Image (cartoon, coloured by chain):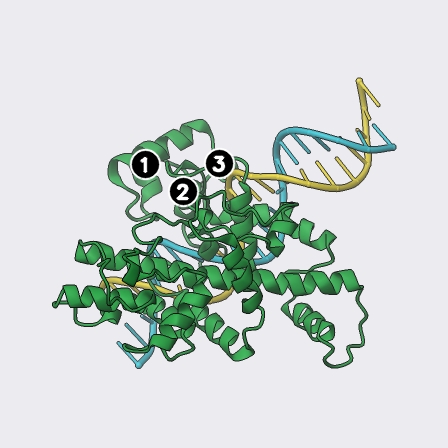
Chain colours: A green, B yellow, C cyan
Amino acid sequence: MGRSPCCEKVGLKKGPWTPEEDQKLLAYVEKHGHGSWRALPARAGLQRCGKSCRLRWTNYLRPDIKRGEFSVQEEQTIIQLHALLGNRWSAIATHLPKRTDNEIKNYWNTHLKKRLAKMGIDPCTHKAKSDALSSAAGAGGGRRSRSAANLSHMAQWESARLEAEARLVRESKLRTVAALQHQMGSSPPSSAASPPGCLGVLRAWRGQRSDLESPTSTLSFAEGRLLMAAAGGGLVDGDYQGASRMDNLAGLEVPDAAAGGEAPWLGEACGWGQLQVGGSFTGMLLGDKNSNCGCAGGDSYGNNDYLQEEEEGTEMNKHYWNTILNSVNSSSSSTSPAF
DNA sequence: AATACAGTCAACCGCTTCCAT
DNA sequence: TATGGAAGCGGTTGACTGTAT
């Protein structure tokens, strides 16, 4: 028993789209929306499968698509997210505005993957990476021998994953604060008595707005999971240590509320492209000879601070890393905009 | 100029996931 | 809870283009 076709394929056109077909599809979607893709071709007067129409629209005709060369920031984001998420192109694409998963996939396969391969890294073989790391750390006695340079690259690759992790946590935190700001329609308090870190802000806001039931009530499930993970599972209301630890992981300066300081990241439109890391493996991979100067996107954090935290990040224990990965995996199917 | 080869990318295929019933 | 249809996703293909010989 063969699988039933997604649509009646007899008489349907395949292959490259003509400008006329594009025009028909574009005009129809702009006027009516796509609705049911299955029904769209007949309504739009196209001799195409609905699937083909959806693909053409999402990968080519959609007005909010950016085409052309990838920027260094975009490359960096792809590399880091791929290190963390693997071939989950749609998940990666959600962090690259105006880029499609198909485009990112093609770019990875034709450019980035080869660049990594030249460095002796197989980004698809996680076991190879962990083997190399174990060997580099002097653990065990692997039968395979690798060059010192390759081992170094492997370790650095792992570092790229940690960069991505730190960015995820930081992004989660930013989103949380932005969501709170949006919901409450007010600026965070800048006066004294605000405890450090994200929870401090949440708590202070809650004090300001008594109708807020709980700081976690405004979080999506995924964000909540990440926050919990960031604090080693111990981030609950009143847990200053958890909040402080999260601040460290997220690479953020804790605002000095007592000094009237306002968190520099509050209200800032921090897209992924703006959150560049400095002195990184991905910077090296991208040929950035002076990769310490990764602040071109306009982030307001001291890069030296971040570098220090990046080094600290490499010392995170395995349990913590697994927690993060689990959070990412479980949340990637949620409705959170983060994944 | 002709041919072979390599690289790129739009599009397709088939499997998985989601959602309505 | 089970089922079927629709949409989404990632791997793969093949046409096209550029470069080397």
Give the crowd class for mark 3: few <14, some 14-19, many >=20 residues within 10 Å.
Answer: few
Q: Secondary structure at mark 3?
A: loop
Residue that label 3 marks: A67
Above or below, C16 against A215 in this view is above
The CA distance from mark 2 to mark 3 is 19 Å
Q: CA distance from mark 3 to mark 1?
A: 26 Å
Q: Quadrant of residue A63?
A: top left
Residue A3's place in the image compared with A228, above or below, is above
Query: Between residues C13 and A30, which one lies in front from this camera angle?
Result: A30
Q: Quadrant of residue A34?
A: top left
| Label whose residue precedes the other's in the sequence (2 or 3) | 2
Q: Is residue A41 above or below residue B19?
A: above
Q: Are marks 1 and 2 in contact (CB under 8 Å)?
A: yes
Q: Position of residue C11 (x, y in %)?
A: 59, 58
Q: Which residue is mark 2?
A: A53
What secondary structure is found at the residue carrying circle 2? helix
- The reply to whether residue A339 is visible in this rendering is no
> Mark 3 vs mark 1: which is more N-terminal?
1
Q: Which residue is found at the position 72% from the left and 80% from the top? A: A139
**Residue at the spot 58% in from the left edge and 50% down from the top edge:** A292
Residue A34's label in the rendered image is none
Instruction: List x then y, in percent, for residue A174.
Output: 35, 58
Residue A329 image offset from top left, x and y in percent = 45, 69
Q: Which residue is mark 1?
A: A44
Q: Residues within 10 Å of mark 2 (few under 14, many from 20)?
A: many
